[in-house]
Amino acid sequence: MNIDLKSQFPALNQEFEGYPLCYLDTAATSQKPQSVIDAMSNFYQHSNANVHRAAHRLSARATQAFEAVREKVAEFINAGQNAEVIFTSGTTHSINLLAWGLTPRLAADEVILIDSAAHHANIVPWQELARRSGATVIPIPLRQDLTLDEQAFLTLLQTHKVKIVALCHVSNVLGTINDIAALAEQAHRYGALVAVDGAQAVAHHKVDVQALGCDFYSFSGHKMYGPAGVGILWGRFIQLDRLTPLMTGGEMIDTVSFSGTTYGQLPNRLEAGTPAIADVIGLGAAIDFMRSLPAAAFAHEQQMLIQLRSRLEALPGILVYGNPHQQSGAVAFNLSGEHHQDIGILLDQQGVAVRCGHHCAQPLMQLMQISGCCRASVGIYTTQQDIDRFIHAMQDAIELLA
């Protein structure tokens, strides 16, 4: 089946110095379909009002649309109930909210295990939690192929008092897919809570938090064809209900007086202040868009990734990282002897957009013994022509630098 969804994404239909845009940086942020842009514009034009606050009809309309998205997200990830869906500004906010909220539950003799391939947003908040509580952070080792070492993980669970396990569902650098269900089952056997960074998974895979068996799952709208500025923290109700709020103020309270304050119920208790209402509406439209796609669109996307990697590996001097059998969304690579930033600049001169740098994963770069790398990442709009143009541009770069 020939899949070409580019026409639905306005930003992809442009040229740079005569070159059509070839966008291979979806792992950093996805482009937005017209339906998402229209949904946000329509809200501002016809329903703009604050939510949960007023008696007038405009506010009622905004509140109804806002809460309808919460229900839509709950269905999208198979949450147990709507109140388990907490709106945040993105994955980073979600993990910070979670790490702060767990502070009273961590002791100085306990351990936080973190995936060595984690994004900084799934490392630094846990380091700060360890600093506040006196707990210890230990990275989970990777195998030589840069996949998580399950045996080493089990040994850490057996030999330490592990309270929290922080995993990435899909690595933002390597595209490596972790078996969250199996890892969560092991962690729970030793009494640990499991928090998953799902930012790189939701656009490529069906996410069922019940089947995954984790305790918390975070993701961002802008990675899944929605707007920036909105994300989700999902957690099991019994766990979320015990979190200490990171943000306090309006919206999240029950009663306030100068003698004391009581907090409201979930989800409001963890959603202080005016939310990013239009962005939430856009997230709902992005979920509608993803649900409208045939299974063949996601199969096509994976085929583009497989072809991108295999054709890259055939080029002279190219180093490709990670396990090709456990890969989703992205391919990390370097040209031997050349700086990754130089490759990115040469590709950009032909309208090809890739990411270069440490990808907010410096501990992983240290394990790989490199300062950084290039990353080409695909989306449901990636076409055969994109892959052809990328490979052609890489060939030109290799010849130029030879």
Image: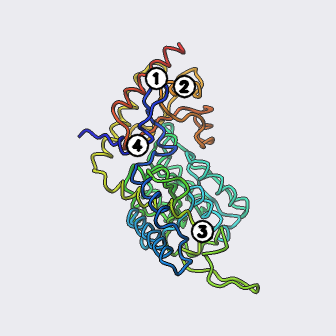
- Quarter of the rendering containing residue 311: top left
Residue at figure coordinates x 60%, y 59% from the top left:
93
Return the disc, 2 or 3, that comes first in the chain's sequence: 3
User: For the residues carrying marks 4 and 3, which lies nearer the camera in this image?
Assistant: 3
Q: Is residue 290 above or below residue 311?
A: below
The circle drawn on residue 343 is 2
On the image, numbered disc 3 is attached to which residue? 274
Few, some or many residues within 10 Å of mark 3 (<14, 14–19, 20+):
few
Q: Residue furthest left?
A: 1
Q: Is residue 248 left or right of residue 283?
A: right
- At mark 4, the secondary structure is loop
- At mark 3, the secondary structure is loop
Residue 6 spot, x, y in % from top left: 36, 40
On the image, numbered disc 1 is attached to which residue? 394
Whether the residues at callouts 4 and 1 have beta carbons within 8 Å, the answer is no
Q: How far apart are the two marked residues, 4 and 3, measured between alpha carbons?
A: 32 Å
On the image, numbered disc 4 is attached to which residue? 379
Whether the residues at callouts 3 and 1 have beta carbons within 8 Å, the answer is no
